[in-house]
Amino acid sequence: MRVDTPHRGGSGEPMLLVHGFTDTWRAWTPVLAALEEHHEVLVPTLPGHLGGDPLGPGQPIAIAPVADRLEELMDAAGMRRAHLVGSSLGGWLCLELAQRGRGLSVTGLCPAGGWEHSSREERAVLRYFRRNAVLLRVGRSQLARVARRPRLRAFALRELVANSGGITAEAALEMFQGARGCTVVGDVLRLARNGAGFFGDLGPIDCPVRIVYGTRDRIIRWPGHYVRLLRMLPDAEFVALPGLGHLPMWEDPGLVARTILEISAAGRAVRHHSM
C-alpha cells in the first residue's frame, strides 16, 4: 500500500488539518487554498487509512496512539503548537491534541465522540459504518459507475452531505476508495461491539474552541450527539451551519474556510492580548 507524504503548503501561523474516520487528507481539498493564504498548513492521512502509515504490529487502534503520531508529525514539521482543525474523528483528535497543550485554537467540524457511551446515538453511528463497509465490499466493482452518475452519486453520499452538487465524480470516487481502503474499520467496530469506550474524557484546554455542526448532518446530529461535549467544554463556542451536512467543506467551502479563520484569528488575538 502506498504511503502519502502529508500535504504542506501556505505561510503564516501553523495549522493542522485532520480528516475523519475512513477518509483521507483529500477531504480538505475544497478549503486548502483559502486556508493557505493565512496559514502554513499540514494535512496528513491518519494511520490505518488509505495512504496513511500502517499501524505497528500489535498496536491497537485507539485515540492516544493516533494522537501520538500526529504529535510526531507536528514535531517533525517544527510545529510546537498549531491551529487544530478536525472533521468528525479528526475533530475529537484535535481536542485530544489541544488538551496536551498543542493547540493555538481548535475548530471541530461535526466532531465525533460527543455522545454518551452505549447510547442510541453511538449505536446509530456504528450502524452507519457497518452498513457502509458491507456496501463498499459488495459493490466495489460499481464504485466508478456510481461516482460518474450524478443521481447515483447523490444517493451514495446522502448521509455525508445534504447537497452533493459540489462533489465531482473524481472526488466521489476518491471518497469511496478511501473508505474501502481503510484497514481499521473492523477493529474499531469490534472495539465498540465489545463495549470498550473509544472516546474518553477531555481535560482542560487552554485555547479558543469552536465546535461546528451541520443542521442537516445525518450521521452526527445536533444536539443528541453532542451532549458530552457540551458538558466537557463549557467555554467552547457551538456554531450551526444551516442546511449543511456532515462534510460541510464540500458543500460551502467559502463559509467553512471563514468559520475556521475566524477562530484562528481569535486565538491569535487572545495571545497578543495576554502578552
Image (cartoon, rainbow, N blue to C red):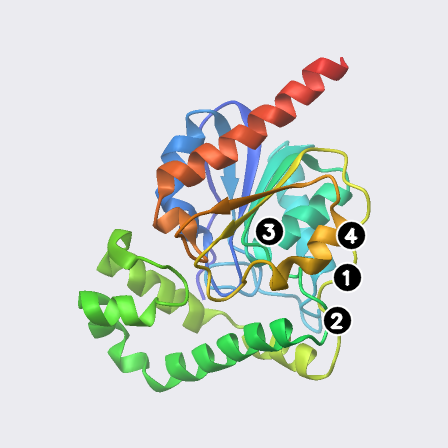
| Residue at position x 30%, y 62% in the image | 172
* Separation (CA) of disc 1 from disc 3: 14 Å
Q: Are marks 1 and 2 in contact (CB under 8 Å)?
A: yes
- Residue 104 has which mark? none
Which residue is identified by label 4?
202
**Residue 184 showing in the rendered view:** no
| Residue at position x 36%, y 86% in the image | 138
Q: Is residue 275 left or right of residue 77?
A: right
Mark 4 lies on a secondary structure that is loop
| Residue at position x 64%, y 54% in the image | 92
Which residue is identified by label 1?
200
Q: In terms of sequence position, does the residue under pointer 4 or pointer 2 come before the other?
A: 2
Q: What amino acid type should be assigned to the residue bearing mark 2?
A: Gly
| Residue at position x 39%, y 52% in the image | 243
Residue 258 versus residue 120 in the image, above or below = above
Number of residues whose C-alpha sits closer than 10 Å to that of mark 3, classed few (under 14), some (14–19) or many (20 or more): many
Q: Position of residue 110 (x, y in %)?
A: 54, 54
Q: What amino acid type should be assigned to the residue bearing mark 3?
A: Gly
Mark 1 lies on a secondary structure that is loop
* Separation (CA) of disc 1 from disc 4: 7 Å
Q: Is residue 268 left or right of residue 242?
A: right
Mark 3 lies on a secondary structure that is helix
* Separation (CA) of disc 2 from disc 3: 17 Å
Q: The N terminus lies in which quarter of the figure?
A: bottom left
Q: What amino acid type should be assigned to the residue bearing mark 4?
A: Leu
Q: Are marks 1 and 4 in contact (CB under 8 Å)?
A: yes
Between 42 and 103, the one nearer to me in the picture: 103
Which residue is identified by label 3?
91
Residue 108 versus residue 40 in the image, above or below = below
